[in-house]
Amino acid sequence: MKVLPVSFSFKGIQQRDNEINNYPFLYTANSTREMRKEDNNRFKAITASLALIAVAITLINIKGRKKLPDNIVEIADKNKGLNKISKYEKTVHELKEKIIYPLKAVNLGDKNIANSKKLKSGLIITHNQKEGLEEITCGLMEHLKELGIETKDINEITTRVNNKGETVHRNIRRNERVKWVYNQIQNAKKSYEEEGKYTVINLGDIGKLTDLKIIKSQKSNFEDMLSNLNGKTYPGVIWTGWTTKTNSVPLFYNDLPVLITRLTD
């Protein structure tokens, strides 16, 4: 019997599998590698979220949280205080936000504001018209009084009875003004030490208490006293005043916790 040779084209399973695996349309990604990539993306997303939360917390801490509602500055009577002033809307809003709110909050026990720069030791309002300045200042003082905050207003006129029994009126002199302010500061300091409450003193026209110059080589004794208010020497005292000399307010007030604002509608 004649045996014929047989030719096999089979190359083996391993080789065939290797060829099949090399076909691009049959390629299958490594599942472990994909899982690692997905985990990395998830980790990056979580890290980014935590970073945003940290930034938000930092901003809140910098800006500070208000423990008390904004409406603590409001009074019910529309015919009293700043409520009765139809003009100077921007100034009224600024005074409520930057002067009245911190002061009222501190009197209600907010220690965070008491130790911050939000609590001003003084206020200077400027404008070229005396009438508007007197109106807004009187409105502010009445508003504070309605909120239960102690206020003191300087008297422009002094009255006495002469030797003839006649009542005589005259404008108070600068030295009398300074003496009155000093006495009020001492009384306010004592009130703060006993009750922990602040007092707002209205100085009126500050140009009648000291010479106003934008650049001064040396402060007057009165100005030196004002710069120490609300500090260790005179705690519990806040002052307010006004001037028509808008371009003569001394520059050193900018270095103090004093709000200088121009009367605007």
Image (cartoon, rainbow, N blue to C red):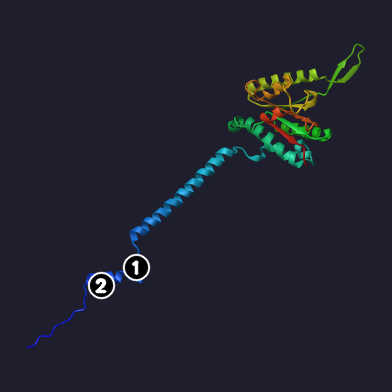
State the separation of the CA atoms marked 2 and 1. 15 Å
Residue 105 figure quarter = top right
- Give coordinates of residue 214: x percent, y percent: 75, 29
Q: Amino acid at mark 2?
A: Arg
- Which quadrant would residue 125 be assigned to in this image? top right
194 relative position to 51: left or right? right
Residue drawn where x is 36% and y is 71% of the image:
25
Is residue 195 visible in the rendered image? The answer is yes
> For this view, does 86 lie left or right of residue 94?
right
Neighbour tally class for label 1: few under 14, some 14-19, many 20 plus, Cα within 10 Å: few
Quadrant in the picture for residue 135 = top right
In the depicted structure, whether residue 184 falls above or below residue 101? above
Task: Identify the residue under disc 1.
Answer: 27
Residue density around tag 2, few if under 14, some if 14–19, many if 20 or more, within 10 Å: few
Is 56 located above or below residue 208 in the figure? below
Which residue is tagged 2?
Answer: 16
Residue pictured at 35% horizontal, 70% vertical: 24
Q: Residue at x 89, y 17 (%)?
A: 167
Helix, strand or loop at label 2? It is helix
Residue 149 seen in this snapshot = no
